[in-house]
Amino acid sequence: MNTVRLSDSTYRKLRQKARARQQSPDQLAEEWLREKLARPHAHIEIVEKISGPRAMVRGTRTPVSLVIGYLKMGETPESLVEEVLPYLTLAQVYDALSYYHDNTEEIERELAENNEAHWRAYLRAHLGERGYLKITGQG
């Protein structure tokens, strides 16, 4: 873990803003630093989700990992905007692809987590076996 030193007045401001956003100062500083230090992607934003920060196509509910998943399945940027995700522009799709190449490990992790086996295990862990069987119609 690395440490960044802040002046007392800067830390007070950070703590105040973090409190207003119901975050810790460390969480807010990490978010801000990630935004400022990351390569700029005009069509991509980092959105805080329950499962952690996710790269999303700005102004949509579409994660970058979804765009990349379709491309890995053989779709082209053109087929995505014409048939699959017609609310996206080519610029957004290409920026998602660019973001992926700048942040491959992060998006690959999201892709690995976004499969049926992962979510079945997640539900079992959070609901218990009886709850899992009930919501899947097996109990």
Image (cartoon, rainbow, N blue to C red):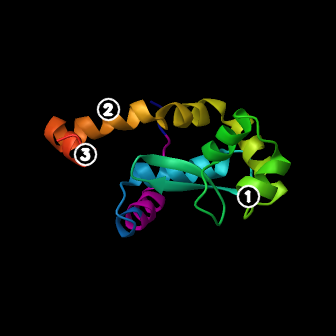
> Residue 34 placed where, x, y %?
59, 47
From the image, tell me which residue sits under label 2: 121
Residue 5 falls inside the magenta stretch:
yes
In this rendering, would 97 be left or right of 57?
Answer: right
**Helix, strand or loop for the magenta stretch, by majority:** helix
**Circle 3 or circle 2, nearest the eye:** 3
Q: Quick one: which residue is furthest to the bottom in this view?
A: 20
The kind of secondary structure element at disc 3 is loop
Rendered image quadrant of residue 90: bottom right
Whole-number angstrom distance, CA of label 3 to CA of label 2: 16 Å
Residue density around tag 2, few if under 14, some if 14–19, many if 20 or more, within 10 Å: few
> Residue 64 placed where, x, y %?
64, 47
Per the rendering, the mark at residue 137 is 3
Residue 6 in view, yes or no: no
Q: Which residues are magenta?
A: 4-17
Q: Residue at x 50, y 41 (%)?
A: 4
Three-letter code, disc 2: Ala
Whole-number angstrom distance, CA of label 2 to CA of label 1: 33 Å
Residue density around tag 1, few if under 14, some if 14–19, many if 20 or more, within 10 Å: some
Per the rendering, the mark at residue 119 is none
From the image, tell me which residue sits under label 1: 43
Residue 89 falls inside the magenta stretch:
no
Q: Mark 2 or mark 1: name the one nearer the start of the chain.
A: 1
Q: Mark 1 or mark 3: name the one nearer the start of the chain.
A: 1
Three-letter code, disc 3: Gly
Q: In the figure, 42 relative to 55: above or below?
A: below
The kind of secondary structure element at disc 1 is loop
Residue density around tag 3, few if under 14, some if 14–19, many if 20 or more, within 10 Å: few
In this rendering, would 56 be left or right of 74?
Answer: left
Q: Nearer the viewer, residue 4 or 106?
A: 106
> Residue 109 placed where, x, y %?
53, 32
